[in-house]
Structure formats: C-alpha cells, structure tokens
Amino acid sequence: MKKIILAITNEDVYKFIPETDYDVIPATDVADGNEQLERIYRNLSAVLVDIEFASENEYRFLKEFRSDLRFSFMPAVVIKKGRLTAKEAKVFEHGAVDAIDTSDVKEVCVKRLENAIRITNSRTFDEFGGMLKALPSNIFLKDAEGRYVFATHYWHHIKHADDPNWTILGKTDEDIRKDKENAVLAMEADRKVLSTGEGMRYTMEINVDDVLEYLDVIKEPVPDADGKVAGVLGIITDITEQEILKRNLKTAAITDGLTGLYNRLEIERRIEEFIGSPKKNRFSLIMGDIDNFKNINDTYGHRAGDAAIKALADLFRKAGDKEGMPIIAGRWGGEEFMLLVPDMVAEDAAATAEDLRREFSELAFDEGFSLTISFGVTEVSASDTLDTICSRVDKAMYASKDAGKDTVTVL
C-alpha cells in the first residue's frame, strides 16, 4: 500500500519521490495545504513543506500542525534547495522533525523522508505508551514467541515488579510470573491466538502473596505486512471487585441465607441434573424435618429456632466431610431439609440418616432444650422424575412422623 505525502511546495518534488512507493498530494500554499489535510489526514504518512511556507507568519503552519492531536504521530519535514541557515533552523523548535536538501541525490532524499516517518513512529510509540499508563488496564504486545515487546503496566504477581531497573521486554510469562500455573495458561492462550489467527477473551483467577485477583484478559492477533500473524496484542483489566460481586450474587441466588446450604430451587435443579445424566443417575434422597419445631419458636423465640436450624446444617456439612462423600444439602423450606447423596443405595443412605438423627438428638442448646428430627429416605428408579422422587421421599419422611417421630423410614 502506497504512503501518502502532502507536499506544500512550489518545487517539483516528484523528481526525488518515487511515484511507485508514494502518492504525492500537491498543495500550492499553506491555505491549500490545510484544506488538503482536512480531506486526507486519515491516510497521511508525512507532510513536506517548503521552508518559506514553514517560516511564514511566525511558523504558524508548523505550530498548528504539531498542536493538532490528529497529527501527533506524523512527521512534518521541511524541504529546501541547499542547507538551512541558522535562522531557518528554528523550524525544528516549532515541530519540524527534519530538513531535506532537494538538491541532494534522489536516494538520500528518499531515505531521509523514510527515516523521518520511521523515527516519528518510534517516538510516538513511546509517547503513546506513556499516555496509556494513565489507564488502569495493562495494554501489551507480544511477538510470535510470546515475548513482551511492550507493556504499559507491571502487576504485583510479577517477579521484580518493584525494581525500577528491571524490564519486562523480551521476557515471556513463564520468565516473569510467580504463579507458574497461570503463566502456562497465558502462553497456551498466546499460542492458540498465533496458530488460529482468532482473538479470545477469558477471566484469570490469581492468588499470589495472599492477594486474590480476577483479571479480564483480551487477546487479538497482530498481522504483519503479508497478513501473517506476527504477534499478540492484549489488554488486562482488574475486575476483582466486579467478579467478587458477581460471584456473591450468583451464590446468593442458589443458597439459603440462614444456613448457607443450597436453596430449594438449586436442590431441585441438582436432582433433575442427576436424573437426566446417565453418569450421575444412581443416587438417594434424604429428607428431614425437625420435630415439634414450632414449640421451640413459640417458647424460646425465633433466634433459638434459627440456632437449631444452623446447627443441623452444620451436621450435614460435617457428615459429607466425615464420610468422604459429596452430600449435596439444601434447605427445602422452614425446618425441612433435603440431602442428595450420589452413588449410594437406599440402605446406606438410611444408615447415614440414622447417624444424623442420633447426632442431632444429642445436641444441647444454650436455652437448655434438645430436639429430634424425622427422616425419609428413597433411592432413584429408572422411571423417576423430579416430582415422583420428591413425592416419595416426602411420604417416607411423614411416615416417620406418623411412627412417633425421631426415626428413619425408607420407601
């Protein structure tokens, strides 16, 4: 793709600018040049301006050109037949980056123009990097080997992050990260972007130096002049506060506020998931209801009742830890609880329920009362739905109530 050069000059610049490499847009004076700038600035690579035009009106064109942010990354090059005088050299104080002697050989003129474009791009790359440091996100560029070419920020889980003489440039994630697991994941993501040419976005969880962080990572391929993927451009944003809030909201949506166990909707979802999965469909349900619970609330108050419910929830959690089995426990409503026990037949689930019944009856509460609980147990069958299995375990639990309470019934 040709570079576009705006030439504000009366000279025939075509004699030293090869038309095969550049499109030259001529302007006969500063006013004409400004009009052309407004029209073509999006595709412009450089501006050539006669020394006379550059110097007139106290270097007004150069001053305005350099102060316009649209042209911050674009060189203004003065042209003249012969070398600049000491007075003319003041153009460099007002934004010119070089001066080309048009009487010089063609190859020298072109090389100076190309160098002006390249040097300006290099300088503005550093300047732009300095600007980006004001943003909270880390913007980075890596080469095809996953080595950092550019990064606006360091972060605390990087080695030597506090050393002002240390640089990230030329290093990979495996070289710099304290958390090697995430270093490997980051480099795997880089390789995927480089090999597929497709961008990706993911959340990285990091826990280093007892600091938990969640980072939003966006990576996009960087093509070279031939369209091949030559690197990875990315941005890392700290989303710890938002992620913790999101996770807390998600937890609140599926858990019971008093006990911390799952709520009824989530337990129902888990039961349906087990019923519908051939890999998980062997399980039993245990349903429990605290006996005579209303008397506790009426006699000792709801605070005492809440303490009893939380104590029972703790027993359910401890049972799973003690037995080494993944008991999925939830509060079904009020003083009722449902336990989903994977990979357990009804007979074994009943033994677990019996242990829980006994342990709960042995608890002594601060107000001096004790409580019992009635359990129902059932095992899933091939024809079960959520409604049929929950109805059956509910009947088993009420059978325990009818049998005198404080017992376990299997259906």
Image (tube, grey):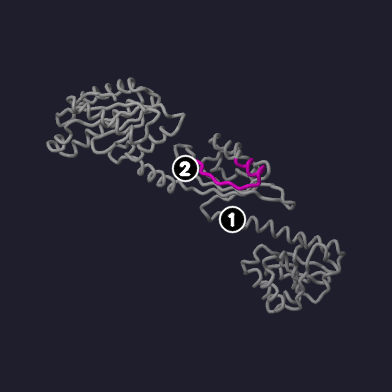
Q: Classify mark 2: residues with Cα within 10 Å, few (<14), some (14-19) or many (20+).
A: some
Which numbered tag is attached to residue 213?
2
Q: Is 233 one of the magenta-colored residues?
A: no
The percent position of residue 145, horizontal first and vertical second, equals 67, 41
What amino acid is found at the position of numbered circle 2 in the picture? Answer: Glu
What amino acid is found at the position of numbered circle 1 in the picture? Answer: Gly
Q: Classify mark 1: residues with Cα within 10 Å, few (<14), some (14-19) or many (20+).
A: few
* Label 2 SS: strand
Q: Are marks 1 and 2 in contact (CB under 8 Å)?
A: no
Please determine whether, in this image, residue 142 is positioned above or below residue 134.
Answer: above
Q: Is residue 159 left or right of residue 229?
A: left
Q: Nearer the viewer, residue 196 or 12?
A: 196
Q: Residue at x 72, y 74 (%)?
A: 54
The percent position of residue 225, horizontal first and vertical second, equals 74, 53
Residue at mark 1: 130
The region drawn magenta spans 189-204
Q: Residue at x 70, y 79 (%)?
A: 31
Please determine whether, in this image, residue 263 is positioned above or below residue 51.
Answer: above
Q: Nearer the viewer, residue 81 or 38?
A: 38
Q: Is 195 one of the magenta-colored residues?
A: yes
Q: How many marks?
A: 2
The residue positioned farthest toward the left in the image shown:
299
Q: Earlier in the sequence, mark 1 or mark 2?
A: 1
Q: Is residue 129 left or right of residue 249?
A: right
Q: CA distance from mark 1 to mark 2?
A: 25 Å
Say which of marks 1 and 2 sits in front: 2
The percent position of residue 410, horizontal first and vertical second, equals 28, 24
Quadrant assignment, res 377: top left
Would residue 150 be visible to someone looking at this image?
no
Would residue 366 be visible to someone looking at this image?
yes
